[in-house]
Amino acid sequence: MMHPPLQPQELAALAQALLMRRWQLASAESCTGGLIAAACTDIAGSSAWFERGFVTYANAAKTQMLGVAPALLAAHGAVSEPVVRAMAQGAAQQAGVAVAVATTGIAGPGGGSPQKPVGTVWLGWSIAGQVNSQCLHLAGDRAAVRQQAVAAALRGLVNRLLGQA
């Protein structure tokens, strides 16, 4: 499944939704490696609503920076619903913000398995203490999977903030 690129008006809607509530956003990224933070900070004025980004590629970073329990990682693997939910919650707590978005997945070209093929990406959102998650199976090469994950994560956040998810 291919997800369309994020449009400037979608990022503007995200900024407006956060500013209207006086909320700030943090990102916790594994497979997207900081691309969410980059997309947000590409927007002039984003310092009013984007607080920080955590790039937690390694499991140890997920534990040290976000408080993801090592037992959770051992039981489910980094690319899983429980871990992405813990990443989103941990980012919100560590940054002291109302909103966080998290990604973990297998961008490829290697690293996949029959249970978790390349293109498997988990997205997580923590909004005012409410945590949601979604699993995607994305097509394309490494760059395409990562870009689609960024678009889906931020689009999903906008939809949740606007009550459309």
Image (spheres, helix red, strand yellow):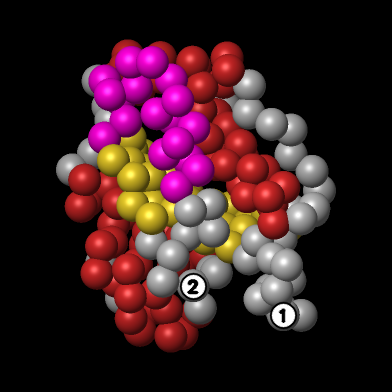
Q: In this view, does 131 lie to the left or right of 144?
A: left
Q: Does the magenta stretch include residue 36?
A: yes
- Who is closer to the viewer here, 127 or 29? 29
- Who is closer to the viewer here, 39 or 62? 39
Specify the amino acid type for callout 1.
Answer: Ser
Label 1 element class: loop
Give the magenta part as a residue range: 34-51
For residue 113, the mark is 1
The x, y position of residue 3, in whole percent, is 74, 39
Q: Residue at x 39, y 74 (%)?
A: 59
- Who is closer to the viewer here, 99 or 38? 38
Question: Is the residue 163 above or below the residue 58 in the image?
Answer: above
Query: For the residue carrying disc 2, how many other residues have a C-alpha within 10 Å: few (<14), some (14-19), or many (20+)?
Result: many
Query: For the residue carrying disc 1, how many other residues have a C-alpha within 10 Å: few (<14), some (14-19), or many (20+)?
Result: few
- Looking at the image, can residue 128 be seen? no
For residue 158, the mark is none
Q: Which residue is drawn at 38% across and 45% down?
A: 27
- Who is closer to the viewer here, 47 or 1? 47
Q: Mark 2 points at which residue?
A: 78
The x, y position of residue 118, in whole percent, is 72, 67
| Quarter location, residue 156 | top right
Quarter of the image that includes the C terminus? top right
Disc tally is 2
Q: Is residue 71 magenta?
A: no
Question: Is the residue 12 above or below the residue 68 in the image?
Answer: above
Q: Which of marks 2 and 1 is nearer the N terminus?
A: 2
Specify the amino acid type for callout 2.
Answer: Ala
The x, y position of residue 146, in whole percent, is 63, 50
Q: In this view, does 67 lie to the left or right of 42?
A: left
- Looking at the image, can residue 140 be seen? yes
| Quarter location, residue 4 | top right
